[in-house]
Image (spheres, rainbow, N blue to C red):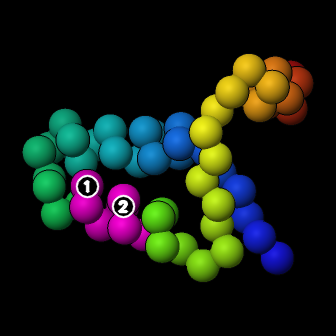
Amino acid sequence: MTGMTSVITLLEVLVRPKMDHNISAIEDYKNILSNFPNLEIVPVDNKIADIASISAY
């Protein structure tokens, strides 16, 4: 089984560590998401944004 997430997930989890200037946490989050088994990080394009807006409705 493969999971998918978007770069928006990375953006969201990095907010607090960046506000706190916590370089270690920033690197940890990046490494965890980039190397998580069977997880694909996909870019957000217009098609994905459209589909996501429907599922949020």
Residue 56 visible here: no
Q: What number of labels is visible?
A: 2
Vertical order, 39 against 44 (above or below): below
Where residue 37 is drawn, which disc sits there?
none
Vertical order, 56 against 28 (above or below): above
- Residue 56 coordinates in the image, percent (x, y): 80, 28
Q: Quadrant of the N terminus?
A: bottom right
Name the quadrant containing residue 32.
Answer: bottom left
Tell me if label 1 and label 2 are in contact, CB under 8 Å. yes
Q: Is residue 30 left or right of residue 47?
A: left
Q: Residues within 10 Å of mark 2 (few under 14, many from 20)?
A: some
Q: Amino acid at mark 2?
A: Tyr
Q: Who's the residue at 64% across and 67% down the image?
A: 39
Nearest the camera: 36 or 25?
Answer: 36
Q: Residues within 10 Å of mark 1 (few under 14, many from 20)?
A: some
Per the image, label 2 sits on a secondary structure element best described as helix
Which residue was labeled with disc 2? Answer: 29
Q: Amino acid at mark 1?
A: Ile
Q: Who's the residue at 28% across and 43% down the image?
A: 16
- Residue 11 coordinates in the image, percent (x, y): 43, 39
- Residue 20 coordinates in the image, percent (x, y): 14, 44
Per the image, label 1 sits on a secondary structure element best described as helix
Query: In whole angstroms, how far apart are the C-alphas of marks 1 and 2?
Result: 5 Å
Q: Is residue 34 left or right of residue 38?
A: left
Q: Who's the residue at 73% across and 64% down the image?
A: 3
- Residue 24 coordinates in the image, percent (x, y): 17, 63
Residue 16 visible here: yes
Specify the segment rendered in magenta: 26-32
Where residue 26 is drawn, which disc sits there?
1
